[in-house]
Image: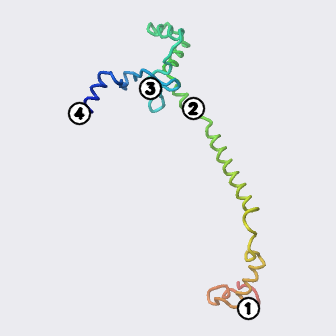
Amino acid sequence: MSFRAAWSLVLRKGEVGMRGIHSPGATAHSKEKMLPYSSYHAQRSYPMPDEPFCTELSAEQRALKEKEKGSWTQLSPAEKVALYRLQYHETFAEMNRRSNEWKTVMGCVFLFFGFTGLMIWWQRVYVFPKKPITLTDEWKAQQLQRILDMKGNPVQGLASRWDYERKEWKK
């Protein structure tokens, strides 16, 4: 007998561990759960959770559950809502309502852009060196005049568009 077959027999008998039964008609069985955690999970795509929302009932809730076993015409609308809240955490309308999370996200995005803008400004003022002299308007004008004086690229370049007799650009 292989180890896998022996282990499955042990699990079926329930001696070492107990498997949960997960089907639409049954609840998931677990003997011990960590306190803040439960198997309750409901969402729009899977609205029928394996366990009810409230597993530990108070005396008033237990009495309401006993009253539930009788005729539903004797239950008031408030009691029906209370029974629904014992089984489910939210209604579909509550699941589908809009949240204001987009405001937080956009606030974080704008905060990030603002911080990035401040960092760029700080780097331009205190970190980056001054502009080189070759980027000043005076230097660019002198460089253009030098190219025109040397008649650089007279066929298709800048010199072809300059009128040397009138000292102005051709029209």
Residue topped by disc 3: 49
Foreground disc of the pair 2, 1: 2
Q: Residue furthest bottom?
A: 165
Q: Nearer the viewer, mark 1 or mark 4?
A: 4
Mark 1 near mark 3, Cβ–Cβ under 8 Å?
no
Horizontal side, residue 135 vs residue 29: left or right: right
Q: Look at the numbered disc 1 and give the secondary structure of its residue.
A: loop
Q: What residue is pinned by disc 1?
A: 164
Task: Name the N-terminal-most of marks 2 and 1.
Answer: 2
Rendered location of residue 96, percent (x, y): 54, 32
At which x and y percent is residue 137?
A: 77, 76
Residue 103, picture quadrant: top right
Q: For the point 47% across and 28% down, which residue is it?
A: 41
Q: Which residue is mark 4?
A: 2
Quarter placement of the N terminus: top left
Q: Earlier in the sequence, mark 4 or mark 2?
A: 4
Q: Amino acid at mark 4?
A: Ser
Q: Which residue is under mark 2?
A: 97
Alpha carbon distance from label 1 to label 3: 88 Å
Which residue is at 45% across, 28% downward? 47
Q: Earlier in the sequence, mark 1 or mark 4?
A: 4
User: What is the crowding at mark 3: few (fewer than 14 residues within 10 Å), some, or many (at least 20)?
Assistant: some
Label 3 SS: loop
